[in-house]
Image: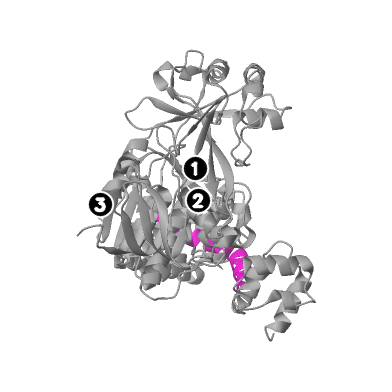
Amino acid sequence: MSLYNTVYDVIVVGGGHAGSEAAAASANMGAHTLLITMNLQNIAQMSCNPAMGGIAKGQIVREIDALGGYSAIVTDKTAIQFKMLNKSKGPAMWSPRAQSDRMQFAECWRTMLEQTENLDFYQDSVNGLIFDGDKITGVKTALGLEIKAKTVIVTAGTFLNGLIHIGEKTFGGGRAGEGASTGITEDLVAKGFESGRMKTGTPPRVDGRSLDYSKMTEQPGDDNPEKFSYLPTTERLTKQRSCYLTYTNPEVHELLREGFDRSPMFNGRIKSTGPRYCPSVEDKINRFAEKERHQVFVEPEGWNTVEIYVNGFSTSLPEDIQDKAIRSIPGFEKVKFFRYGYAIEYDYFPPTQLKHNLETKLIENLFFAGQINGTTGYEEAAAQGLMAGVNAALKTQNKEPFILKRSEAYIGVLIDDLITKGTEEPYRMFTSRAEYRTLLRQDNADIRLTEQSHAIGLAKQDRLDRVIEKKNKTNSLIKFIEELSIKKEEVNPILERKNSAPINQSMKLVKIASRPQIDFSDLLTIQKLNSFIQENNIDSEIIEQVEIHLKYSGYIEKEKANADKLNRLENVPIPSSFDYSKVKSLSFEAREKLSKIQPTSISQASRISGVSPSDISVLLVYMGR
């Protein structure tokens, strides 16, 4: 089959984390998909730190897995360390994170994609888009090919007119050693799109053999590591590699300041906005001048490589300043560089120009995902890629779009924030962005999302079967605990050991299990409970679900009630033809913002910055409510 005479259902432009998930999702939904990338060797490359997950990001990876995406599976297969962060806090804050072997990660992704039916590959650079009026019909490549498609997903990462900065040196590129992508921005701007510039950066990579780890604090993985994927096809780690922690100091800061006049950040060469929550080391010592030290995490890039990622030392200072300053960090006195840190500027398109299915408002059948939408992070990119892939496939099948609500997933929060609020700095997900985080836990993503994904044809039957089994076993154990009466002789020794008030008469086990001092593991000495667990083959995953339910059911029910109230407003649609300019009782700012964003429901309108409760009341009257 020739590229010249094929009309693909979906073309995915770019093979990063967004592009890889987009290609997998659309192909798995039966769409004939073509993934075009500049270099097939760099599919799903970890351009920055060799890790997946973290605060809120770990929840996203679990959601991708629950929906049938690949990121969690690849992470489990290539992990070198696993940690569950925030374990001392409530379960809404628990966040899985894994260090990966960077080379194995990209290799595993490519292998999984090559084993995916309906997916073709082509190595070339896309430097133009083909339109028929206000519809996209294909792409143009650097070799001059015009490849036709019903839908196109652009996942260009940092490559659109990318510009790399190291001190006074500036050169075009989308990533170290790779060229920039030109032509796409220009075609989109000519069609009326608004574009902007953003900045991100990366730290030096160094030779681990040149470091003195005795001067650092070892940071091993969890004693009993978990994993990301809900499927049994991936295994937990049996051995792990440690990371290490060290710190900058006043001497390091002074040496870095010597290069500020040569820094592209401070001398005006970089005009775009960088990530607030992952600042460069020069930005940190400039903004937080009162701090005498900052953390530096020493992260191995894999099982067998000596390459080290210096997390916390992202910089675009001149290489001689980087070299001099880093040697004053304990353990780095004799460091050898593999490559220097750099900053990169690139084009993005404010995401208020998208619909909730990630299709652009201006051009039909054109979808954006990843850093082109102003986000930062592998996890945020992968989530958008999956949703764009799903919705592009659904569009070719003339089916309704698949849109997740804020109360259903962190992915729903991410996309709604982008579409409704926009972003002027690289957007990163945090638990604080989600108003329903007690519902959106990392442990229950499969229960929340797999049935919906199976219904649209993405999640396979084995995933659904596991979710149904998990639900049934969870409910049966909860019911057993609610009905089991326990004698004081059985439970008082446990209560005394845990400094919890003893009981004077028999009591339902559920009341004991809900006490804050009591862990579920404390109750496993109760014979009837232990026998029920053994006879019904109930594993630790089910026990975790039950314990969270028993301890937090009040909070969970309250959050569900709040979500249901707001979801009623989601069911009050606003016609796409509605003319806000004629509603004079709306504030001027509300008319302006509503006209620009074009919300599809009253609930979305209420989340737009500048739209007040009184404006919402006016709209409800107009919508017949």
Look at the image and tell me in which quarter the C terminus lies: bottom right
Question: How many residues crowd mark 1 within 10 Å: few (<14), some (14–19), many (20+)?
Answer: many
Main secondary-structure element of the magenta-colored stretch? helix
Q: Position of residue 262 (x, y in %)?
A: 62, 22
- For the record, the magenta segment spans 539-565
Gap between marks 2 and 3, in whole Å?
30 Å
Tag 2: residue type?
Answer: Thr
For mark 2, what is the residue? 185
Tell which of 606 and 394 is nearer to you. Answer: 394
Q: Residue at x 45, y 58 (%)?
A: 63
Q: Earlier in the sequence, mark 1 or mark 2?
A: 1
Tell which of 271 and 57 is nearer to you. Answer: 271
Instruction: Please tell me the numbered disc located at residue 114.
Output: 3
Q: Position of residue 490 (x, y in %)?
A: 50, 58
For mark 1, what is the residue? 161
SS at mark 3 in the image: helix
